Amino acid sequence: MSIDTHKRDFSSNARLPGICALAAAIGVLGTIAAYVLLNLIRLFTNLFFFGAFSFADRPPADNALGLWVILVPAAGGLAVGMIARFGSEKIRGHGIPEAIEAILFGKSRMSPKVAILKPLSSGIVIGSGGPFGAEGPIIMTGGALGSLLAQCFKVTAGERKTLLVAGAAAGMTAVFGTPVAAVLLAVELLLFEWRPRSFLPVALACAVAGFMRAAWLGSGPLFPLETAQPNAISLLSCAILGIACGALACGLSMALYKTEDLFGKLPLHWMWWPALGGLVVGIGGFIEPRVLGVGYDVIGDLLHQQLAVKVALAILVVKAIAWVVALGSGTSGGVLAPLLMLGAGLGIVFGQVLPGNEPALWPLVAMAATLGATLGAPLTAVVFAFGLTHDSNAFLPLLTATLFAHGFTTVVMRRSIMTEKIARRGYHIYREYGVDPLERHFVDEVMTRTVKTIDAAMPVHDALETFFGASQTHRAYPVVRGERLVSVVDRMALMALVEGEAAVKRGTSVGDAIARTTPPVALANETCRLVATRLAVHGLERLPVVADRESLRLIGIVARSDLVKPAQLHFDEEHKKERFRRFAPLRVGKRRTGM
């Protein structure tokens, strides 16, 4: 049995080693950017809440400002509003939608201003008590660094996208120490493809960032945890909790964009909105100081059951309101850490009534389920929760609850919190993707092998009468000399030769009259997708198929109509309902034997 050696599992790419080398360098830059951002947050936290120029890691909840704490987030919001107004408006928001928009609609080009102003503005906002995480800003900052480095080299937009995402994923790895989850986030949210040409460079950048972070902060999990083995009753609890987390995700998403609409109706320039949002954050921080800032320490306390149920409920309510209002005001900050805290708080509340396991499991499960449902990235959420805790016993409950939550949101909501903002700017993003039917099939599977050709020695006038007269069957025909392709001509081309200023003499052959340029061709071992692209680029309806580009031996022709065949097969697979077996009903009683 012969094997088609030209058919591969993955497309080949000779530029992949060079792109990987750039991705490794971007992994280093992303880690440095994460280090700078985290230290900026600590610096501004000490300046705003403790009046000290220090990089010490101190939670803003320990402040002694009293009522003055209400004004601190407002001051930070005002500063960021001015930075956005007079610096770059692209620093507004939580980072991931902006990165997606740059990837899909901006050819992955980002400006140097974003790389500088995004971490600065995020450091000010979070340092002044903004209820955000560092991951969204570092995704935007790392992506900007990757894009800027890519712009220094001669690369395609697809390669530039890969390097942008490599910087974003490397930054997330450096913040949380979860390289596998960062790669999955890239696949589920940013790359919009699953190809070695993009997956390998991004994974390499995350690996580099992971090793660098281990040398910087150590290799242990951010929130080490170990829960008991789940039992059979846990499945029901996971389903209930997953649906509750899905409902929370839907509520947060709808509330966020309703709040954004309300801010849009204010008779004030958007520069002032973050300051107004900061006032709400300040009031929330006065009521419950633990909602201020990143809150990694609070997440750890929730996961380890170190906070009472009433406190967890207060954190859940106040944090949700403060986060929604602050983010709706257009300030700069991330969504992952707030979602982790909100999910963990919900898990504490539900853990009091859910059967099937120790209560310590449910904050972790709800944390991942809320994250996965809100982002629309369930695999990222499951692996992310494991990377943060290294709790292998929780894997099955994590997977179950997260899938229930994700299923709930995909049924109830049209878009996620990540894509709604982009949709409001007039762009639609379809997040499902699979193997293109045109990628699965090759030209030799759909081409027409019996081709009617024009001999290059035939006179032009005879060719017009024979092939383009009343009995014309095709719009164009290949011109061959022996078996070698010379050109492709249609009626318009031959009529131009006959009627033009330099009209050919009767008896002049087609081969002598046509231009000596090799026409676009297709090869039998090329994918239908590649040929479809070539037809679109050249504005053609068909291509001659040759054995190779040296001999130009004609072996067939492929038309646009031929490329519909794989799509028809795909349609049948997706929509044609078939039944191959029927189950006969069981008969109860004695079998009749006819005796």
Image (cartoon, helix red, strand yellow):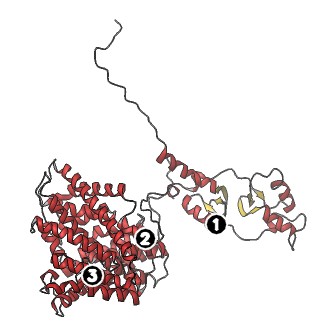
Is 151 located above or below residue 515 in the figure? below
Asked whether residue 184 appears in the rendered view, the answer is no
Mark 2 residue type: Ile
Q: Earlier in the sequence, mark 3 or mark 1?
A: 3
* Horizontal side, residue 442 vs residue 464: left or right: left
Mark 3 residue type: Gly
10 Å crowding of disc 2: few (<14), some (14-19), many (20+): some
Tell me how many marks there are. 3
Asked whether residue 52 appears in the rendered view, the answer is yes
C-alpha gap between disc 1 and disc 2: 48 Å
Q: In which quarter of the image is residue 394?
A: bottom left
Q: Quadrant of residue 194?
A: bottom left
Provide the residue designation for mark 1.
550
The residue sitting at the front extreme is: 267
- Please state which of residues 354 and 209 is positioned toward the viewer in this rendering: 354
Q: Tag 1's secondary structure? A: loop
Single out the mark in the foreground, 2 or 3.
3
Mark 1 residue type: Glu
> Which residue shows up at 9% across the image and 68% down it?
306
Single out the mark in the foreground, 1 or 2.
2
The residue sitting at the right extreme is: 506
Residue 208 horizontal/vertical position (percent)? 29, 77
Provide the residue designation for mark 2.
422
| The C terminus - image quarter | top left
Provide the residue designation for mark 3.
278
> Which residue shows up at 20% across the image and 71% down it?
318
Q: Which of marks 2 and 3 is nearer the N terminus?
A: 3
Q: Earlier in the sequence, mark 1 or mark 2?
A: 2
Residue 477 horizontal/vertical position (percent)? 74, 58
The residue sitting at the top extreme is: 595
> Which residue shows up at 31% across the image and 55% down it?
408
Q: Tag 2's secondary structure? A: helix
